[in-house]
Amino acid sequence: MITLVENITDVAKAPGEIRAGGTDLQERLRSRISRSPIVDISRLPGLKSIEHYAEGTTLGALTKVADLGRHPHIMNNYPALAMPAQLLATPQIREMATLGGVLCQRNRCWYYRNPHFSCYKKGGDGCPARAGNYELGTCVDSGPCIAPHPSSVGLALLTYDAELEVTGRGRINVTDLYGDGSDPTHDHTLQPGEMITHVYLPPAAAHERGGYHRLMSRALAEWPLVEVVVRLMLDGDTISQAKVAINGMANIPLRLPAVEDNLIGKKTTDQVFEAAAAIATKGIVPLPQTAYKVGMIRSGIVAAMTTARDHTPGEKLML
Amino acid sequence: MKTTINGQEYKFDPRADESAIEVLRERKQLTGTKLVCGAGVCGACTVLVDGTPMTACLLPAHALEGKSVQTIEAHGPDQLHPVQKAFMAHDALQCGFCTPGFIIEAIAFYDSWRKEHGKKEPDRDEVALALSGHLCRCGAYVGIYKAVQRAVAGDFDEVSEIESPRVEALAKVTGQARYTADVHVPGMLTGRILGSKHAHARIVRIDISAAVAMEGVKAVVEMLEDKYKVARYVGQPLAAVAAISEEIAAEALEKITVEYEVLPFVDSLDEALKPGAALVYPESSKNPPNASEGPIPPGKWEGNLRKPYLNLMMTTWPGKARRIVKEAGQDENLVLVQRTYRTPGQTHTSLEPHCAVAHWQEGSLTVHVSTQTVAPLARELAKYYKLNREQVTVLSEYVGGAFGSKQGFTTETRAAVELSRVTKAPVKVVYDRMEEMTIGGYRPLTKSDFSIVADKQGNLKAMTGYFYGDCGVAVQSQCAPWVRFTYTGVPKDVKDFDVVTNAAFAKPFRAPSGPASFWVLESAMDELAHRLGKSPVALRRHWDDSTIRMPLYDWIESLPAWQKRGEAGASAGRFKTGIGVAIGNWFNIYFSQAKVEVATTPGGLVVRTAAQDMGNGLRSVVAKAVAEEFGVSPLTVDVQLGNSEYVEGPVSTGSRGTNSIYQPSVEAARKVKEKLLANAASTLGLKDPHWENGGIFHEKGFLPAAEVFRQLPAVSVVEKRGGNGLFDVLGMMPSGELGANIVPKMTGSVFMAQVEVDTLLGRVKVQKVWAGMANGKIVNPELAQSQVYGAVIQGMGYALYEERISDPATGTLLTVGMEDYRIPGIGDIPEIEVHFHEGGFESVKGEACGLSELSFLAVAPAIGNAVFNATGWRPTEIPMRPHRVLEGLSMALPQVQEAKSVEY
C-alpha cells in the first residue's frame, strides 16, 4: 500500500513508513525487512530549499544530499556539513537521498539487514550481534543495540547544534532526534506520523575551518568504521572554539565536549590534536570485538582535525 | 503515471514498492540496465534521470513521474557516445555486466567536466570520485580510468571507426549483449528457491500445500539432495517454486512450512577440530561435494577431518623433512621459519548471478544458463534426465563473470529444469544477491602450519606444511601440490586436510587453492630471506629449479623501485612505504579434444565452437587467429559461441581456453583458405591464385575476401587441437568430464608490489604492482594484459578487503551483500605494469599457455611482503583489514604499542 502525500498535514494521517528518496527503504522492501505501507512524501512542495537569513540558514528536508555538498553557501559557511555530504555513500545515492531521509535512515547492522535474524529493531527482543560477530559494531556498550548510527549528515548537524522542525512537535535540537541510545527499537525518536520538514543552522561562524574523516578499508564508497566531523574556529593559528563529533563509537552520534574544551586557546599543532584526541578514549571500556576501534577513534579525530587545519576551503576533499 | 524513457512517453501503474529497475527491465524489457546488488552499492543499474545518474534499484518507480529517463539503449551502435568508443578502444570491459552502468555515469561525468574544465584531462582522483559508485568484478578499472580520461580529453570526439581488441565490445558498450539474466521467453515463469533456515537439521516434513494453493503458483518441487534428508548449511535448497510473477513466487516460499529437527552444528574450522565437535557428516556413508576441478581421491575420515591419500604423492623424504624442521632449533647453522597462516573465504561475486532459463518440451530440453562449461553441461543434463544428447541444447552467449563458480550442473539450473519439467513452461531462476553470496561459491578458508629451513649460506634444506582447508560441507582444498612443485629437490612433508563445517560448499575459484598456497610459501620464504640477510630475489633465483622465471628475476632486479627499496621497517613517519616480491608457479593445461569449425558464408567468415566467453576474451582470440590467416579485420569474423549444438570447444576453467582453441582456429582457417584457393581455380577459373593482403591474387588481378566469400561456394572445416606430439606420452592425463591434458612444464610469474601503510589508520594502499609473466606466446596482447590487470585487482581484494564472515551462533552468512563483502573499487586501483616474457613453450602446439590463474598467485604475498618491508610487521593472516593491521603494528612498533595501552 502506498500513500502519495500532497499536503504536509496529511503525513500524520497516513499509516506507514515515510519514503523520501527511497535509498534506504527500497532496499529493505526488496529484502522484505520492511513490509510497511509506504507514505511517499517526495512530492510535498516547498521542502527542497537552502535559504539563508541573518539568524541562520534553513534547509528543506527534501534537499538532496548532493546539493548540500555542492551549494556555495554551504561550502563557504558550513564546511563541516558540506564535507560529509560530498563523501558519504556514492555519487548516485547522494543525488537521490534527501536531508530528512539520511537523518532518519535505519542502521547498517548486518544482522538487522539480514532477513534470517530477528532483533530489537525488527520487533524481536534481543540483539543477535552480541552473541555473534559485531566487528563493525560500536566501540563502547552504549545501549541494547550495538550498531553505530549511520548518518554522516546527522553527525555534522551535531557540531552545528542544529535544530529540526518536526511536524506536530515543533523545533527540537538534533540531539533530541537521536536520544540517548537506550531505546534499541528505533534509530531516531520520531513517532509514527511525525516528520522533519526543515533543518535550522545557526549563522555562519567567523574563521571556521571544517574537517572530516571516514575510516574505511577501501579508498571510497564504504560505510565507515569510525567517522569524525570537526569544526575549528580559528584566531590566527589559535583555536577559539571547537566542535567535535564522532560516529562508530556509540549507537548514536556523539559530541565530545571534553575534547572540544581541551582545544580552546591552543595552537593547531599535531601535538595539541593528539593530546585532545587522547581524551576521547580516556577511561572508555571497549567491547571485546571492537577494541581495535579505540586507536582508530583517536586517529580519526586527529585526521579530521588535521584536515580542518590544512584543507584549502572550497576545494574538493579527498580522503 | 507518466514518464519518459529514452525519449518516448510511457504510462504505467507502479506497485507500491516497485523500483525503477523493474520498470525498465521487466515492463520495458530494457535489459541493458543490470540488476546486481539491489542495494545501491555496485552501480550496475545506473541510469540518467533528468540527466543525473541514479541507481535504478533504489529509485522508487513513483519517483519517475514527469521525469525523463535515459538508459544505455539511448546510445545504440549508430549513436555511440565518445565515452563508449573510448571504452572499446581502451578495453575498459571484460564480462561487460557492469559496463552499461559505468558508461552512463561516465557520460554524465564527461558532460559536467567539459562544462567546467573543457578538454583538460581529469586526473585519476577526479575519475575515481566520479565513478566511486560502481564496482567491476573482472577488474577492468585500468582501462576504465584511461577510457574516461581520454574521452573527456577529446580523443574520441571526432572518431567514427573504432577498432577494439575485444570483438564483442560494441555489443557490450551498447547494452545489446544478451546475458542469461536478460533472457525473456514468452510465457516464462519465475522460479525461486527455499533455503534451509538451520545450519544442520533433519528435514522431517515439508508442507507445500498452502503454496500450491496460491493463485499464480504453477509448481512446487523438492530440491534437497541428501539421502539422509538432512540439511547441512543455512540456505541449502529444500524446495523451489514456479509462479507467474516474482512477488507471487516470493510469497509462496513463505507459505511453505518446513518441520526441522535441529541438530548441533560447527561453524568454523577451529570449532570443527575440537574434541567432541558436532559432526557435519555423522552418517557412515559420506558424500561431500567437490570443491575442486579434479576427482576426489580416496581419503580417511576422523570426525570432521578428512585426510586424502593423495598426500602420499606430495611428499619427498617426509621423515627427513620433519627431522630437519624439528632439529633446526638446535642447529646454529640452520634458520627456521615456523608460522601459522590464515586465508579467508573469498566469494566469487560474479556480477551476473547464477541464473538459468529452462524449457522442457516434448522431446527436447533447452537451457539458457550462465555457465563456463557449455558442452559438458549438455552431456551432464542428458545423462541426469535420461535424454539423448541431441535432445538437450545449452545456450550461453554472454556470461557476466564466473571465475570458477559456474561449472557443470548447478543448483539454479536444476531448479529451473525441474520446475519446467513439471509445468512444461519456460522457467527462469535467477539468484538474488543474498543467494549468490551464500551458495554461489567461494574460495575455501585455510589455516596452515608451515615450516621452512635453510642453512646460513641460504641453501634450502626442508619444508613441512600442513594445510587445513575449510570448504564448508565440501572437500578438496589442495594447497600442498603447489608447495610440492615449487622450489623442488629438498625434503618436503606437505599435506592437505579437509575440515568440513556446516557452511555452504566452496567451489573452484581462479587458481583453486593456489593463492592460499603461495601466500604461505612466499610469505615464509620472504621471512627466511630477511632472517638470512639475503636479497629475496637472489635467494629465490638460487632455490628455483625452473628456468622459466630466470628472465623475470632479471627484470625485477632491473627495476629502479627494487634497487631503491629500503630495509624492513626502515621507513619512518606515519605513512610507510615498502616493496615486496613473490612468485607463482602453475600447471599448463589444455583440452586435446577441443574442436572449432571455420566456415564461409556469402556474408563472410563464421567460426563456431561450443565454448563460452566469460569476459576472458576467447571470442577475440578465435577471431584474431582466423582473421590473421585471412588478412582481414577480426571484427569481420562472426564468432559464434555458447551453444552446445556446435562442435565441442574447451571449458573456461584451468586457464585452458587460448591454449586449447588458438591453434585449431589457425589451422582450420588455413585449410579453409586452401579450399577456397582450389575452388577459385576450379569454379572461377582463376590462374595461380594465392592468398595475400586480405584476398586472392591471381594472374589477372585481385579478388578481395568479401568477394571471395560471396562468389565461391561455402566451405567448412572442423579442426581438432590434438595433443602435443612428443609431450603426449608424458603429459596426457585424462580427467573426467572436463577433459584436461597437462603439459609437464609449468608456467611462471614474479610479481612485485609497492605499498603505503597508514600506520595511524591501519590502511594499506597498494601504489604499484609489477607483474612479470612467463606463459609462452601472447596471442592477443591487449586482452592478455587486461586479464592480468583483473587478476592483480582480485588478488588485491583477497589480500586486503574480501572476507566471508558468518554468524557463529547460527552459521548464517553475514556478508550477504556487496556492502559488507568488499570487492576492490576504482579508488583502490594501483598503477599496474605488466611484463610478458614470451617463449619457452615451443614444444606446445601454438606455443601459448594460460595466464588467468598464474597471474593471481603472487599478488597477495607480494603485497604482504611489501607491508613487511614497509613496517617490519609480518602479516600471516589476510585480508589485511585495518583492525588486523593496527593489531599487527601494535606488536611490531613500540610507539603504537604504547599508544594502544589505554586505560582499560
Image (cartoon, coloured by chain):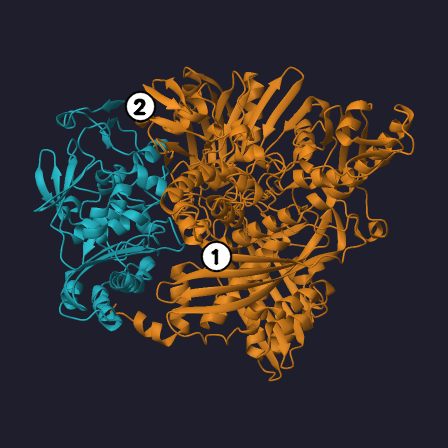
Chain colours: A cyan, B orange
Q: Which amino acid does label 2 sit on?
A: Gly
- Answer whether residue B814 is visible to the viewer in this image: no
Residue B55 visible: yes
Q: Nearer the viewer, residue B322 or B424?
A: B424
Left or right: B407, with A149 as reference point: right
**Residue at the spot of label 1:** B270
Quadrant showing the C terminus of chain B: bottom left
In the rendered image, the vertical position of residue A50 relative to residue B357, given as above or below = below
Q: Position of residue B603 (x, y in %)?
A: 72, 25
Q: Position of residue A37 (x, y in %)?
A: 26, 26
Determine whether the residue tagged by mark 2 lies in a helix, strand or loop.
Answer: loop
Q: What is the residue that sits farthest to the bottom in this orientation?
A: B332
Q: Which residue bears the numbered disc 2?
A: B66
Q: Which badge, 1 or 2, comes first in the chain's sequence?
A: 2
Label count reads 2
The answer to which quarter of the image holds residue B892 is bottom left
Asked if residue B408 is positioned above or below residue B856 in the image, the reply reads above
Task: Identify which residue, A65 or A27, lies in the foreground.
Answer: A65
Query: Which kind of residue does numbered mark 1 sit on?
Result: Asp
Q: Residue at the spot x=44%, y=65% of the render? A: B756
Q: Position of residue A304 (x, y in %)?
A: 27, 60
Observer-nearest residue: B314 or A254? A254
Using the image, name the chain to which the residue with label 2 belongs: B
Labels 1, 2: one chain: yes
Residue at the (69%, 43%) spot, across then down: B657
Up-down: is A69 above or below B336?
A: above
Which image quadrant is residue B390 in?
top right
Label 1 SS = helix
| Measured Cα–Cα span from mark 1 to mark 2 | 58 Å
Disc 1: host chain: B
In the picture, measured across the screen, residue B811 lies left or right of residue B847, that is left
At 11% from the left and 49% from the top, the residue drawn is A202
